[in-house]
Image (spheres, rainbow, N blue to C red):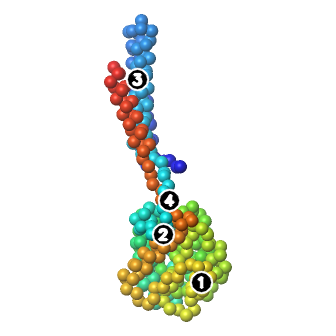
Amino acid sequence: MEAGISHPWMLAAGLPLPLIPLLLAQRAGARRRILISYLGGRSSRVVAILGYARAIGILLAVLAASGVYIVRVTWIPASGVSGEVLAEVPALHIVLVDDSKSIGPHIGETRSFVESYLEALGPKDRVAVYKFHMRVEEVCSPGPPQGCVGNLSMIRGASRYTAIGTALGYAATVARATGLPIVVVLVSDGANNMGPDPKTVARGIDEGNVAVALVKVGEDPRSILEELAQETGWPLYKLGSNPPPGVLADLARDLYKEAKVEAASVDGMIPIERRDYTPTTILLLASLVLLASSKVTGP
């Protein structure tokens, strides 16, 4: 079980506050010790105790204000999981987009599909978009999907080469750098003509927390995507020629849900992490009790 705080700045700013009642109690005790020494110092001890109680009460209030929580994990069946629940699962989406000349006639629907996919992502998802030809180039680094949309114009379809194996190998390297579930979406016409054999590279990235989906653009007869899908078992989606915007959006949402469920599920179950702020409530109540009691019994 993990724990954390929502507002660490509150903790840093409030830590000096408990020192104030301790200092006041010390000074008050010193004055009263002179005036009522015949009581054997009992009054000064009472003042000190009350000062400690107030200090602890303030410390607990500071902890409560910082938002102390524990993380509880609930496992739910992956089958039939709702979109709202799936949105609570963080994942990293690696989108690989063919930037070769052969995809040029379909560059409009290619960008539209990628944009629709970005719009389908949940608030806890992160995405990285790369274009590939003979090598892989970054379109946008891992981050919120909103920051990627404006960079899609970098995908122009201007290269002579398509290296699908190189792109998949690059995605495998990025995937190993994070502990999140990984969704890899490769968008291409499939006319591979450079780089390592995609089927050989695919064997190295077919891991438990990585889901790969292939999206074929157009009808290029040289496409290897059908063969790659059959070899690996990865799902293959087809955009076709000049699909309506609504079809692209529906396809993007379906791909997102199916791939994310596959990446996030373990033995048919999906872990959902939720923050439980019960510790904050307990700290707040304890703080109120200490501060109220020291106020009632104190001078």
Q: Residue at x 62, y 82 (%)?
A: 231
Report crowding for label 3: few under 14, some 14 to 19, many 20 or more residues within 10 A (C-alpha).
many
Is 283 or 78 nearer to us in this picture?
Answer: 78
Q: Which residue is mark 2?
A: 79
How far apart marks 2 and 4 lie (CA) works out to: 12 Å
- 107 horizontally vs 204: left or right: left
Q: Where is mark 1, residue-wise?
A: 230
Q: Nearer the viewer, mark 3 or mark 4?
A: 4
Q: Secondary structure at mark 4?
A: strand
Q: Amino acid at mark 1?
A: Gln
**Residue 106, image x and y in percent?**
45, 87
Which circle's residue, 1 or 2, is located before the other in the chain? 2
Q: Residue at x 65, y 75 (%)?
A: 203
Residue drawn at 61 percent across, 79 percent down: 232
Determine the secondary structure under disc 3. Answer: helix
In the image, what residue type sits under mark 3?
A: Leu
Q: In the displayed image of the protein, which residue is found farthest to the top? A: 38
Structural distance between the alpha carbons of marks 4 and 1: 31 Å
The image shows residue 101, relative to residue 67, as above or below, that is below
Q: Identity of the amino acid at label 4?
A: Trp
Q: CA distance from mark 1 to mark 3?
A: 75 Å
Crowding near the residue tagged with mark 2, few <14, some 14–19, many ≥20 C-alpha atoms within 10 Å:
few
Q: Nearer the viewer, mark 1 or mark 2?
A: 2
Q: Earlier in the sequence, mark 1 or mark 3?
A: 3
Neighbor class of circle 4 (other Cα within 10 Å; few <14, some 14-19, many 20+) is few
Q: Position of residue 50 (x, y in %)?
A: 40, 23
Q: Disc 3 vs disc 2: Cβ atoms closer than 8 Å?
A: no
Disc assigned to residue 50: 3
